[in-house]
Amino acid sequence: MSELALFGGKPIIKDSFKPYKSIGDKEKAAVMEVMDSGCISGFYGSWNDKFWGGKKVQEFEQKWAQKFKVKHAISVNSNTSGLYASMAAIGISPADEVIISPYTMSATAMAPIGYGAVPVFADIESETFGLDPDCVRAAISPRTKAILVTNIFGHAARLKELKAIADEHGIYLIEDNAQAPLGTDDGQYCGTIGHIGVFSLNYHKHIHTGEGGICTTNDDNLAQRLAMVRNHAEAVAEPSGIDDLTNMFGHNFRMTELSAAIGLAQLGDIEIHVGRREKLSNALSKAVVDIQGISPPLVRDNCRHVYYVWAAKIDSDILGVSRSIFSKALVAEGLPNFEGYLAPLYMLPIFQKRIAMGRDGFPFNGSDVEYKQGMCPVVEDMKDNKMLGFEPCIYDISDNELLLIEDVFSKLHDNIIALRDYEYKEAS
Ligand SMILES: Cc1ncc(COP(=O)(O)O)c(C=O)c1O
């Protein structure tokens, strides 16, 4: 049995992994075609046929809608912009409340604040890390306007249950689907089950346009409102004939023709890009299956997990080793560190100090919603003790490197007694 690198043995992985590169000849040719046309953005902020964007933007939206089997796709320049546009489109108002998971990227919780609404954090379920429907029910108040759910790590939250809750209360379900393109819940694509879904096309995602995003909806009215907010709604409200002026102002969230052309090329290969992440993640899951105390990511029945993050869970009581020591041993063998994901969002200074828009604490100053350590124990346990991940979207792992990663896990498995002794000595 070879000695762990943590104790002075030779690490199994010597070189750092290459970054995943999906930009190739197709993307280069697509960009050059747009460059040669001379028109690198086709939008005008006025009510004419250019209001809807250029040729590539419109083709990209059409193909996206086809691929994801949804009526409308509205491109934007980031997922963050798309979340803002969604809040605007559903008519969110100051003092409204939006229920959100604290275990997501900060952008999810900022969009409501941008319209003066207040995020209310609900805990997650421990199986697939998405919002727990029971906690969502408990968080609903007369002020709740929407549930903004994240399909975190590439797996669907309990979307059907959450949609039923939203329908029961006459509120909206918006999906932050930045991390789960092609993910499915009960055979339906994530991002198309709520009233609006928002995808990210930033550089770290399964497919990307550098920066970019896209909103999806089956609702004609919401589609029009999203397109208006994207492109200076205030200037086109009158000629568009829109009835409800709520939030119809303020932004340029438009995508360039260059980004759309790259997006078209990437979308054409989306199954390949997502498939590579699935293959890698399935291999990682297999590598830990015999280690008692580590649970590989769970995939619910009839769901497709697309693994933005391969997120395993450590049960230290069974493993006999804490996550931090196990992770230290993995890192010593050459794997990148990934423990816990992000801290619960309610611990950010914006919530702890209740300062956001202006100096007087708006929108928190008129609200009794609280942000306290301990309020979402499942998230805190994942962050502090249990979740151990790998980011398949970031690295391009060769078959040979995959074998090495498998060797790392079996080396730790073989040396578990030595790790337990180390843990014991560290603790005493
Ligand atoms: C869950 C989630 N929401 C929102 C975002 C923000 O996406 P973008 O960079 O496209 O604005 C990200 C990006 O990592 C994310 O993972």
Image (cartoon, helix red, strand yellow):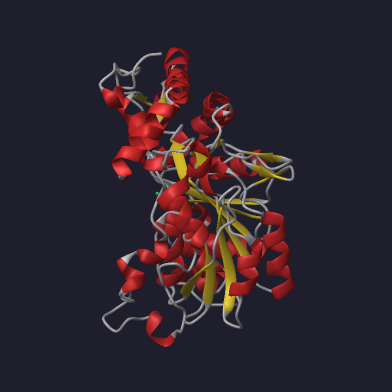
Left or right of 105: which side holds 312? Answer: right
Residue 168: quadrant of the picture: bottom right
The reply to whether residue 413 is visible in this rendering is yes
Left or right of 157: which side holds 238? Answer: left
Q: Which is more toward the observer, 76 or 117?
A: 117
Residue 293: quadrant of the picture: top right
Residue sitting farthest toward the front: 428
Residue sitting farthest toward the bottom: 366
Please state the horizontal and vertical placement of residue 131, each as a whole percent of the image. 58, 59
Q: Which is more toward the observer, 234 or 12?
A: 12
Q: Is residue 169 above or below residue 55?
A: below
Quadrant, the N terminus: top left
Residue 365: quadrant of the picture: bottom left
Q: Which is more toward the observer, 421 or 48?
A: 421
Please state the horizontal and vertical placement of residue 137, each as a whole percent of the image. 65, 71
Quadrant, the C terminus: top left
Q: Residue at x 25, y 21 (%)?
A: 8
